[in-house]
Image: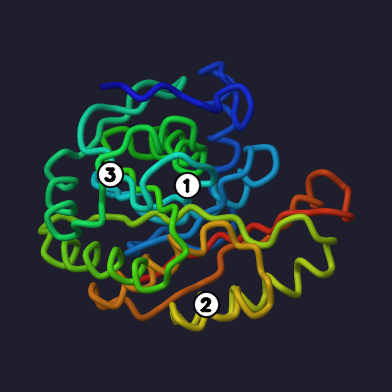
């Protein structure tokens, strides 16, 4: 089965040459951090015009292995609370990205909560917008797509523990890409204050504290579930370091500070 692009022409260009050029523009090396090996990264998933420079700063600062797990959020029903696809490919204007069937099989065996569900992925953009970056920077990659539609903390921990257990036994490096924007649709000043509180807990790699602060402070981090699962998994692969690579809000591109979305690009190792 080939999953066709759902947001080409809206979140990113549908023309292959234009898309490739934009990805290269966002991933051109600068005076940023050196390229390094990491266990996971957190990247935004808005349109390239708004958050591509944040995602690109992360992807261009790390070595991308040929095995990737992408953890995204299921923004809208219908679909499973923990949806995986184990076979086939995802198509973008740059070609087809192949699913890693063997790795997907191991993840499903480790986590019965993961349900085979192409419907949950069919219109979801949070995973799709990351794939062109991977296609340009690591053309040989294969991946496993997982979309989480639950906000139940214990369920998210169970998914994260299963992912971490599988990745800990893999002989090849696997990059865990977690797709999330931060606070939504408040003014720029309020969003920056709220985002800082979430980023502090991401830097401390504390899944419970991140979950609690987002609930207590009403931080509308859409990928809170994937981030909780990621931080849980990282404990099992002995990751203990985190760094904020770039932060921005949509106002930096739109010029409108009245109702913005926050974007953080982070790495974990």
Neighbourhood count class around disc 2 (C-alpha, 10 Å): few under 14, some 14–19, many 20 upward: many
Q: Quadrant of residue 156?
A: bottom left
Q: Give the residue pinned by disc 1.
A: 74
- CA distance separating discs 1 and 2: 19 Å
Q: What element carries label 2?
A: helix
Residue at 29%, 78% in the rendered image:
235
| Placement of the N terminus among the 4 image quadrants | top left
Residue at 52%, 38% in the rendered image:
125
- Placement of 181 over or under 207, stated as above or below: above
- Placement of 66 over or under 236, stated as above or below: above
Q: Quadrant of residue 143?
A: top left
Q: Quadrant of residue 199?
A: bottom right
Q: Is mark 1 on a helix, strand or loop?
A: loop
Question: Mark 3 or mark 1: which is in front?
Answer: 1
Q: Where is residue 224 in the image (x, y as percent from the top left)?
A: 51, 64
Q: Give the residue pinned by disc 2.
A: 210
3 or 1: tag closer to the N-terminus: 1
Q: Do the numbered discs 1 and 2 sit on residues whose CB atoms are within 8 Å?
A: no
Q: Do the numbered discs 3 and 1 sit on residues whose CB atoms are within 8 Å?
A: no
Q: Give the residue pinned by disc 3.
A: 144
Residue at 23%, 67% in the rendered image:
164
- CA distance separating discs 2 and 3: 25 Å
1 or 2: tag closer to the N-terminus: 1
């Amino acid at each position: 089965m080939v999953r066709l692009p759902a947001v080409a022409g809206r979140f990113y260009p549908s023309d292959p040459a234009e898309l490739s050029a934009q990805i290269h523009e966002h991933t051109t090396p600068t005076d940023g951090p050196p390229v390094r090996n990491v266990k996971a990264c957190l990247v935004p998933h808005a349109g390239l015009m708004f958050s591509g420079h944040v995602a690109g700063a992360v992807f261009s600062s790390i070595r991308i292995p040929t095995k990737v797990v992408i953890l995204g959020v299921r923004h809208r029903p219908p679909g499973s609370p923990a949806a995986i696809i184990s076979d086939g490919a995802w198509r973008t204007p740059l070609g087809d990205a192949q699913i890693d069937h063997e790795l997907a099989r191991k993840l499903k065996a480790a986590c019965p909560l993961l349900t085979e569900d192409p419907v949950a992925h069919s219109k979801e953009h949070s995973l799709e917008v990351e794939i062109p970056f991977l296609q340009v920077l690591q053309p040989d990659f294969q991946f496993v797509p997982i979309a989480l539609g639950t906000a139940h903390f214990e369920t998210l921990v169970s998914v994260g523990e299963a992912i971490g257990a599988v990745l800990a036994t893999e002989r090849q490096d696997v990059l865990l890409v977690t797709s999330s924007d931060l606070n939504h649709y408040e003014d720029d000043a309020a969003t920056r204050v709220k985002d800082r509180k979430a980023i502090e807990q991401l830097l401390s790699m504390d899944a419970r504290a991140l979950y609690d602060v987002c609930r207590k402070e009403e931080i509308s981090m859409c990928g809170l579930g994937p981030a909780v699962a990621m931080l849980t998994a990282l404990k099992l692969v002995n990751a203990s370091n985190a760094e904020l690579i770039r932060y921005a809000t949509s106002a930096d591109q739109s010029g409108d500070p009245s109702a913005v979305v926050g974007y953080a690009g982070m790495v974990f190792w």
